[in-house]
Amino acid sequence: MTRCAYCKKQGADKKTSIHIWENGSLKTMKMDYCSGACKQNILDFVKSHNKFAPYYGGIALVWLLLFLAIPFAMKAITGNPKYISVGSPAMIALMGVILVIFPLGLSNTKYYERLGIKLTTLFIRLTGLLMVFTGINMIWTAV
């Protein structure tokens, strides 16, 4: 008995063929689903995943550059160490907000296959919320 690719319920007897971006190229996969709503959710996920996954590596590189460059450059220009103690947590909080809004931060689909699309996106959103609260707490204690 197979499990639904979206909700991971037992008894998914229908399959849908999708083209999903994985490891630098589009691949054709068959995903099991249990209901019409799960099929629509899978197709919506694939559409949004294919839209952002090709750019994930570049976005991560730019994010790392911004995360390191902005606070340290501002400290170097002004000499004020507050830019590091406030700038870095602000970047962490901003990254958390982005993960809450766009929970498609994984370029590999093996995690979605293990937990299901629904639980993986929930986990990414909860991680984003944790990052937001951690960043705000770090800013609050630095000021």
Image (tube, grey):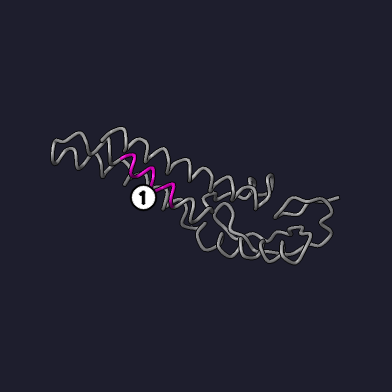
Where residue 79 appears, as percent x and y from the top left, is 14, 35
View extreme (right): residue = 1
Count of numbered badges drawn on the protein: 1
Name the amino acid, label 1.
Answer: Val
**Considering only vertical position in the picture, is 80 above or below 6?**
above
> x and y percent of residue 111 in the render?
63, 45
Q: Which residues are magenta?
A: 88-97
Residue 55 location in percent, x, y? 46, 57
Question: Could you tell whether 14 is left or right of 142 in the image?
Answer: right
Residue topped by disc 1: 62
Vertical relation: 111 (above or below) 12? above
* Mark 1 element type: helix
Residue 73 is one of the magenta-drawn residues: no
Q: Quadrant of residue 82?
A: top left
Q: Nearer the viewer, residue 119 or 14?
A: 119
Left or right: 122 as drawn, with respect to 12: left
Image point (31%, 38%), residue name = 139
